Image: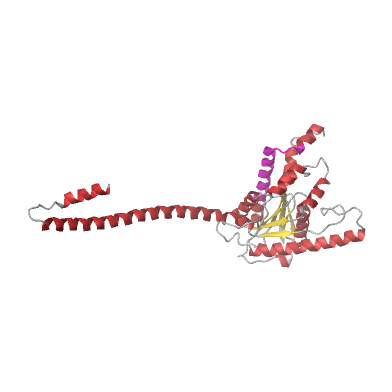
Amino acid sequence: KMDVFDDTLGLKNIPRSPQYNNNNTEHPNNCVLCFCGLPGSGKTTVSLELQKLCNLHGIPNARIRFDEYEKKEYEKLDTGENTPQLKNMKKKFEPESWKRARDACFRAVRDALDDADDGNEGGASGALVILDDTMHYKSMRREAYRYAREFRAAFIVVHVDVSEEECWMRNSRRDDGDVLKVPREAFERLAAAFDRPGKGGYDADEAFDKNYMVVKPPKKGSGGGSGSSNNTSSSNIEEEEKEYAAFCQSLLDEIYARWLTDETPRRKDELDLLKLKRERSATDRVITAANTVHDVDVQTRKLTTEFMKKISLSSSSKSGAAAPSSKVLAERVRRARL
C-alpha cells in the first residue's frame, strides 16, 4: 500500500493499481503537474477529477489551488460584515496580498514534495503534486519548475485551452462576491498577456515548458465547468459525465507516461548550465585576448630581430662608420613601437 495525500496533505492508505506502479528506479519518483489556462477554462474541474482518479488508483497526490490561498488572504480582511466597502475591497487587486498568497502556495508545493519524498519508502512509484492556477506568465511556471528540480521530480505543464469567449461566459456566471470572478478589464489583460506553453523557441532558460500538453475538456453536466445549459436532459448529462470521465482517465494515462519519461530529474539544472556557459564564454574571451597579445608580441620580436640583423650588416659594410651597438638598436626599436 502507498500513502495518499488528501487536500490537507493528510495521509491515508489505498492500494496502488498495477498500471500505475512502475518500480524502475531510473524514473523520477515524484511529479509536479502544473495547470495553466484562462479563468473559467475548467482547470479546477479537471484537476479535481484527476485527484479523484489518483485516489481511486492509489497514486499519492496533493492538489494545491492558488485561489484557496488568495481566499485566505481576503478572509483576513473580512470582519464578518458583508458591507459594500468589503465587497469592493475584495474586487480590488492588492499586490501585497497576492504576493503573500503566491508565496504560501509555493511553500505548500515544497511541503508536498518534501512529504512525498518521506512517503516513498524506497519505491519509485512516487506522488503527483497538482498545482491549479492560471500560470499565465512563463515566470510563474518557471518558479514551479524550480521546486520540481530541487526535489528531482518530473515536471509536466497542462494547458487547458478553451476559447476566450467561453471562459468569459463561465467567469461571468460566478457570484459577484466570489473572489474567483475576474473583472472584465482584468480578464482581457490576462488573456492578452497569456504566455502559451510551446510558444516560440526554447533556450536553456525555458526548459520548464518543454514537457507540456494542450487539452480541451468536453462538456460536463448541466451548470458544470463546461458552461452547458441547465435545460440539458438527464440522459445528455449522463452521456457528458461518461465522456468527461473517459477524458480524465485518458489524461491520467498520458500524464503517467510522460511522468516516467520526463528528463527533468536527469538533466543538470539548466540555469546552472546557462551560468557555466556564460562564464566559459567570458573566460574564452579573456584567453582569446591573451593569445592575441601573445601572438603580436612573438611576431614583433621576430621582426625586431630581423631588423637588427639587417641594420648590423648594413652598418658593418660601410667603411669608416662605426656600427651601432645592439643596445642602441633595441632602444630605437622600442621607441618606434611606442
The quarter holding residue 186 reads top right
Furthest-left residue in this view: 320
Q: Residue at x 72, y 67 (%)?
A: 19
Furthest-front residue in this view: 319
Please state the horizontal and vertical placement of residue 314, each as a whole percent of the image: 15, 57
**Viewer-side residue, 272 vs 293:** 293
**Viewer-side residue, 142 vs 312:** 312
Q: Residue at x 84, y 53 (%)?
A: 227
* Dominant SS type (magenta): helix
Q: Quadrant of the N terminus?
A: bottom right
The quarter holding residue 22 reads bottom right
Q: Is residue 236 left or right of residue 247?
A: right
Image color mode? secondary structure
Q: Is residue 301 left or right of residue 243?
A: left
Please state the horizontal and vertical placement of residue 288, each as a whole percent of the image: 39, 55
Q: Which residues are magenta?
A: 90-111
The quarter holding residue 301 reads bottom left
Residue 237 is a magenta residue: no
Q: Is residue 290 left or right of residue 82?
A: left
Please state the horizontal and vertical placement of residue 135, each as a whole percent of the image: 69, 50
Please state the horizontal and vertical placement of residue 319, each as a whole percent of the image: 8, 55
Q: Is residue 329 visible?
A: yes
Q: Is residue 268 left or right of residue 9?
A: left
